[in-house]
Amino acid sequence: KDGWIAASNIDFAVEFWRASDVGSDAAPAITPSCQKLMKTCKVDFDDDLFTEQVDCQGGIANLPEATDNDRSDDDKNSPENHTTANSNPLEYLSHIPDLQNTFMKVISDVRRMGEPSNREKDKEHEQSQPENGISSDGKRSRRNNNRERGKIAQLEEQRRLRLERQSQSQSEISSNAQTEQSDQDDQDGGLTLPLDGFNNNLSNKNDENEGFIRVGKNHDIFPSTDTMSPGWRLAITFNSLRIFVSLLRPILDNPHRRDTSLKMKYGPSIKTSGEKHRNYLLSKHVYSCVSNGCWKELRREYVNMLALLNMGVEKMEKQDKASGRYDQSVKDWITSLFDHSQLTSEEFLENKCMDFEVLPSDQGSAILYKTLMDQFSYESGNKQDELKKSIQDLQSKLELAISRKFKGVRLTVYGSCLSGLALQGSHDVDVSIYIPEMYELKQKFDDGINSAKSFEKQMTNIVFRVKNCLQYCRSESFDDLFAITRARVPVLKGRDINACNPYSPDGSLSFDLCFLNDIAVVNSSLLREYSLVDNRVRMLMLAVKSFAKKNNIASAAGGTLSSYTWLNLVIFYLQCIGFLPNLQCRELMKQHDWHPDPGENPWHCINGLETYYLPTETMAKSGIWKQPDRFANTKLPNLLYGFLNFYARVFPQQTTAVSIRFGKCTLQKTSFQKTSKIWRLCIEDPFETFDSHCPHDLGFHLDEGGQRKVMNCLAQARDRLGDLLQQAGLDDGLIQSFVDLFETGQKSGANS
């Protein structure tokens, strides 16, 4: 609506257009910090700053002129009315000392997409606790303890969400869908909407929240994060982004920001010496004086924010030198970020991703195709057979050593060893361990018998008991044992020094022994199923995985993305262009008359999650799903270019999450309430979904440096590969430059 984002356009569960004291009667939803900014800068939603392609002076030079004879006695002391025909209107702006911090707060809120900061959460939690005469030292200690809740708080949250999901499921089964719930919704903290438009009162004429939509138990204008819908968060984020960019862009580019000839009438002026006041922040109605350091900090945060958003920023920032006007308004830029109308069309996305200005050369594609196939082809030589035997021996030795202390132990290899997507030279083995005693403890915790703290303590004890089993076993084969108990999944790392690994100089084989991690086994199985649909899928997965490792962007611990996450990105891209089906699609399962059976197959339901999918073998036999004919002659290099271009230029990462469970650009990234950030990729785990009791955002580990590095690598590789594909002839030097993008030191192949 006029370029403002309404949550009703994004999330059909509820409309969030509401009445406001600022501007028109139907003002867009924004963050509280942005409301404060608008009030501070004395602007409303109808201001031309938000609707026009203003110049870098932000309309300051067009302030109305007046003389003393035109003013009443009450207006003579008003700064807005003190301009005269012979004076500079800039000199009569109102002074706001804290303008920079107000902008910084809005930037911070937009980056978190409306989620409170950790400091605000700690403060809210502290205020919710009874004081009971606690001293300041006691409060500080309690605050520190709150920040260290970590794993225990995560476990409690998962149990709470799980019980809520179970309760909701039971309610849906037992209740009549046609029953009126309006009264009960109000008692339970549900949603109440006015029936006759947004200006109706919710309670009475004197209600201070008159005309506002009520969400949850609170009657606040701005709902708490617990009741905030994904559509609401998207709306307040991008409306606030539009406001602060519209206000800040002309302030930072204002040609008078260091004009020492300006002598301000209602506040301090900048000085030619000293560090305190060296720059003006000149807005349309107000101004502030800041030091060089403060100005650079504000500029840096602004530039970083736009750089991480990555889409259309160059055009939005470009100015005409003669007029000083910007080429694109902020309104048009924000609207373009929500232009998703065609992103669910497979053919449109295919054409968009493979947007060669010149058709790829058949000769160039053929040479690069052969290069990739040689690089990532399956090898079944003596080394592969030796490695397979080493992994089997390792699994047997681990199981034998642990079963001496724990009965009923079962070990399952997962990861690249299971999916067949390993690169030679990197053969760490991932093993999931099943111990009945541990799962009994987990069940008691889920049932509320044990507390999270007690469960965590008992789990840690089991991990170290397993470590002792390996450390003091008779074979003396295990070395470098190291337990990580505070991780999301407890891990025991180690190395089998007598593994006879053909790819290791000393014959050792490293392993990660993971506890309560059966979900990883079905994750790896799902990747393997997708890789079996078409051999080009497996080749593309290996190429992207090798590319990520080569460019040091395949480490979650290093602030980038894990190899598993990169493979999810490949599958999602191929689903979006129609190259792959969605194996988790219930309609596809129904067409194949395939039904999950958790009673007979425990892998169909792990930790209360729906962990089933349609087997590729079943789909291949039926012939119901067929790959579109347009992909029959698509070469691997073209698919690789499309992948790089999709994430570098096409995918709307500012608003949308990657999800192979949906297989289309339809999941709002704000569905992940606590982890989504406007500047980084949001990637849903196939089974630990956003609406489950243990939502898992695979992009959570990305830091700002990692996000920037990932996007730069994708863009650079896209440009280099695009140039190579369009060349008629490729010499050895050009081919080697291409191989250097992906080669990790050795040729790759499956290790199982």
Image: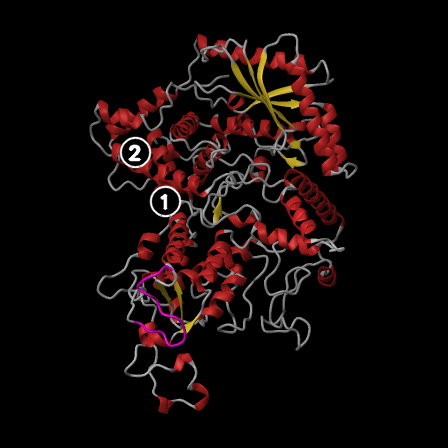
Residue that protrudes farthest toward the bottom in the picture: 69
| x then y, percent, for residue 276 | 39, 61
Q: Is residue 189 left or right of residue 422?
A: right
Residue behind mark 1? 649
Q: Secondary structure at mark 2?
A: helix
Give whichever of 445, 346 is nearer the camera.
445
Residue behind mark 2? 721
Mark 2–mark 1 Cα distance, whole angstroms, equals: 15 Å
The span shown in magenta is: 262-275
| x then y, percent, for residue 363 | 24, 27
Nearest to N terminus: mark 2 or mark 1: 1
Amino acid type at image mark 2: Leu
Q: Is residue 637 left or right of residue 76?
A: left
Residue 602 seen: yes
| x then y, percent, for residue 336 | 39, 55
Q: Is residue 241 left or right of residue 213?
A: left
Amino acid type at image mark 1: Arg
> Quick check: is 307 in the magenta stretch?
no
Q: Is residue 632 left or right of residue 111?
A: left
| Residue positioned 48% across, 40% down in the render | 702
Residue that protrudes farthest toward the front in the picture: 274
Give whichever of 600, 29 is nearer the camera.
29
Q: Main secondary structure of the magenta part?
A: loop
